[in-house]
Image: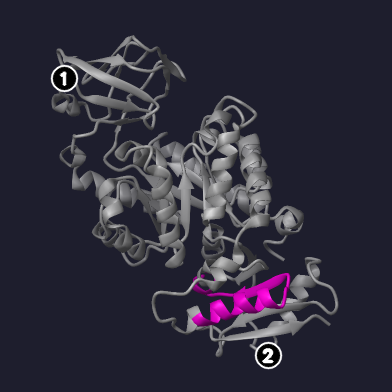
Amino acid sequence: MQGLFLLQRNMKNWNRTKIIATIGPASNSERLIKRLIREGMDIARINLSYGTKTQQRVLVRLLRSVSQEMRHHLGILVDIPGPKIRLGPLRDRAVFLRKGALFRLTAEKVMGDERWAGLNYPSVIKAIKKGMRIYLNDGLIKLRVLEIKENQAVCFVENSGEVRTGKGVNIPGIELGRYFSAREDAGRISYAAGLEPDFIALSFIREAEDLRRLRRVLGRKNEAFLIAKIEKRDALRNLDSIVEASDGVMVARGDLGVEISLEELPLVQKDIIAQCNLKAKPVIVATQMLVSMVDSPVPTRAEVTDIANAVLDGADCLMLSDETAVGRYPVEALATLRKVALITERRFPCLKYLNRQMDKYMNTLEAVSYAAAWTAYNLNVDCLVVPTFSGETARWISRFRPPAMVFVLASRPNILRRLGIFWGVYPVFFPFKISLEKLPAKVEFILKKLKLVRSGDRVVITASNPMGETGKTNLIQVHEIA
């Protein structure tokens, strides 16, 4: 039966918080992708800011091929670069900028080094003024502009650090819209959709209309989840409508931590997670989760605590970026993330989510999902089984964070892959060519095959009557295993 191989292997170490890993030069081989899947990668991220289109297409095919071979429903997330200034090509893999040195940003096409580098939008140089602060690599390196000279911004390096090709350049006070055409934006969106990913992340969302515009460009045939990356202060002001218009949200702490003060960031992260939880929208916490493991096999204590807090706050997914894309220890970083999440989840406040009152009237699907989670909790059952045609029932049951293992049965490959973003659910292939009366027996057969239940155990099953209608889940059954 499809989808059961990895399920059996991971039952004893099954973490509910999902893991997204960015695939890059350090991890884009068949061998390493298989290792990342075995260690718990639920979704593979491809950052379209890096690599050629040919390389990106090859990577998508490789990910699909490996996941099919391993019978694992691996989702693919493509991250569309928005209007972001980035460093041009550098001569070496990494360039070290030393505190007190001079570093020039230039409008010329150059091969960068520790003395200078080009920009992907060279005309931005004309907008830079003396005295401005410029931040490289998610704000880790600060530059102060001393003078503008011959299409170059001559900068003083205020603190040491490494930079790589394509790393972000943040210049507060410069509006990037004038450097990024609507035609270019639409072209990138259409290209991303052509890769047929399961999730599309859109950078620098400011308002819900940005997402509606993306949906118009993609058209009705697109089935990928749209993930809104929260990176701008405007997005925080419009957070409620953005969450409502999206299929999921990413707390992109790199650029957001430059846009707002670092002191604000922890509380803003908590607020975003809480709002997504209430609206049953999956939320991803990203950037520098284990950044020390780019070069070290061991994380810092602060990083481990950061992961644990994100889990306890209710994040659906945790994402690794440089750690798995360019780091020296990609597999070790992912394994560390999974282990910390797994141990932290032992103290996860499931009852808080079950007791939390909804701010709005519950429709039938929401009420049944809540009742299923509550029944599983009160009966202390190990398994909650959710047949779904669209994934909507799984989304709402995930929102209520039941402590039981939630097995979501689906027949469409794209739905099975999309389920990888929801907290606590595990996708299982199911043909759906049976009647409602035969559903419990079929569920029992699957659970016994997986060795998850014994005679006398009880499981909670949701279903729709009649079977086969999308979003029409309307009943719950407690089934005792024969």
Amino acid type at image mark 2 = Glu
Tell me, for residue 130, which label it has, or none: 1
- Foreground pick, 364 / 377: 377
Q: Residue furthest right?
A: 455
> What distance separates the C-alpha of mark 1 from that of mark 2?
74 Å
- Foreground pick, 421 / 357: 357
Amino acid type at image mark 1 = Lys
Residue 467 shown left or right of residue 228 in the figure: right
- Foreground pick, 423 / 220: 423
Magenta stretch in the rendered image: 367-394
Q: Residue 122's spot in the image, x, y percent?
A: 21, 26
Question: In which quadrant will I find the C terminus?
Answer: bottom right
Q: Residue 177's spot in the image, x, y percent?
A: 18, 42
Question: In which quadrant will I find the N terminus?
Answer: bottom right
First along the sequence among labels 1 and 2: 1
Q: Quadrant of residue 179?
A: top left
